[in-house]
Image: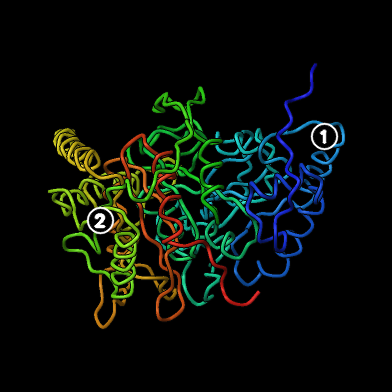
Amino acid sequence: MSAPVREPRRTDAPTGDIHDWGAAGMAAAIRAGHVSAAEALDHQLARIARLNPAINAIVTLDEEGARHRAREADAALARDQSMGPLHGVPVTIKDCHETAGMRTVVGFPPLAGHVPARDSTVAARLKAAGANLIGKTNVPPLLMQPQTDNPVFGRTGNPWNLERTPGGSSGGSAAALAARLVPLEVGSDMGGSIRMPSHFCGVFGLKPTANRVSHFGHIPDPPGAPRTDRRYSSSGPMARTLDDIALGFRLLAGPDGHDTELAPVPVAEAETPRLGDLAIAWAATFPGVPVARAIRAAIERLAGDLARAGARVEEALPPIDFERQHDIWAQGYRVMMRLAPELWGMPASPKAMGYELPTLADTVRMQAVRDEMILAWDRFFAAWDVLICPAAIVTAFPHCPPSSPIAVDEGSAAYGQINHHCFPFNVSGHPALVVPIGLDPGGLPIGAQLVGARWGDERLIAVARALAPVSGPFRPPPGD
């Protein structure tokens, strides 16, 4: 049997410490012999041992297995064999993607000892690309909170300020990236669960177009049980560079023979456009949704800087009833809150029991309204290359009990409004990418949500590249 095709070698070594490297850069350094897979792993494990106890981002760590896989990766290179574009790179994934032989708990006490016999498609594709899957990152119970805290593993802190939340439900993923414990993560997003933590922690996060990345092996649906969501949830890459977002999406997207909802859309490269050729819409917030002054100012500043750099920039939104769009999202979420625990043989929470499940007629009517809204967004993105808007109403807020009011400048907002800027694109299915754009007066990260045309994920990433000289790169938290 012939050896696998080897990835091209690079002669230049990445700059900075190993933990500052991105996934693509680390893989290239391993292939070029600047560092071995074992050395890269040892460096990251030492950093995890030093920083993770305080942050509590990584909640399952397969150190012994990771060292064995790193040795295998180095032995393959010695035979002039490449395992793929992530050859030997240590990565973690959100603790909702099933991993064969590694526990998948989803912050849910009945699953505290759950060790799947199979890999989710997300885990399988990372492994097939040569990644060394070393562990899992923390989530709220069954992914159903915008903070990351659960009775099994406890609370995850934000590396920028441990007294503040990294968000949820991919909070452990975003915190691990910001602390530079790993260079690549995969989250999932039903209502901002990739985008809000990316904003809170100052990293990049892509919610792909609905049904471009497989849902196979994604919990809270139990293995073999009916799927509770077929419309709103997407899994996608989280990283510290756009290169790694693009690489992660290429590796994850596409039909897998399991998820029947996946669209057979080929993954293609998109050329980075000229900034001067782009039509950019922006909105400091959505109708009826509060937003902190610092976030509003950062979005307005970015829009102004892009206009001065030559882009066509205009404040614009489609004529959509945003409150009704949220009602449609809430209908699907309430169904999931009722059904997911029950499918595990547990009663739904008292709050969930207070929700009436929609009738069949209600569901059909709401789907028709959703179709109208999807088409309205499609028409909007026929005229605009991208929409720039907030990812949340505030920057990372202090840990608090669920349903607590959230301070917004001198006022407050309902807890459920935190991620009202994210819901519309779970309903419509459009891809949305959060990029870091600066810090608030308290030194906490601010991210902008970039939204583009459906099925145009590669184009959206390319547009983000065009904006990057103005929007800026990842910056690490202060300290180490």
Q: Is residue 11 above or below residue 368?
A: below
**Kind of residue indicated by mark 2:** Val
**Crowd around label 1: few <14 · some 14–19 · many ≥20 (10 Å):** some
Q: Is residue 388 left or right of residue 83?
A: left
Query: At which x and y percent is residue 100?
Result: 65, 37
Quarter holding the C terminus?
bottom right
- The colour scheme of the drawn protein is rainbow
In terms of secondary structure, where does tag 2 sit?
strand
Query: At which x and y percent is residue 173?
Result: 54, 56
Q: Is residue 416 left or right of residue 167?
A: left
| Tag 1 and tag 2, C-beta contact below 8 Å | no
**Kind of residue indicated by mark 1:** Ala
Q: Which residue is mark 2?
A: 313
Query: At which x and y percent is residue 235?
Result: 46, 43
Compare residues 377 and 363 and report the one nearer the observer.
377
Q: Is residue 10 above or below residue 471?
A: above
Q: Which residue is mark 1?
A: 76
In the rendered structure, find residue 254 and report the number of the disc placed on it: none
Tell me which residue sits at (72%, 26%) in the image.
5
Mark 2 or mark 1, which is nearer the start of the sequence? 1
Query: At which x and y percent is residue 73?
Result: 79, 39
Q: CA distance from mark 1 to mark 2?
A: 50 Å
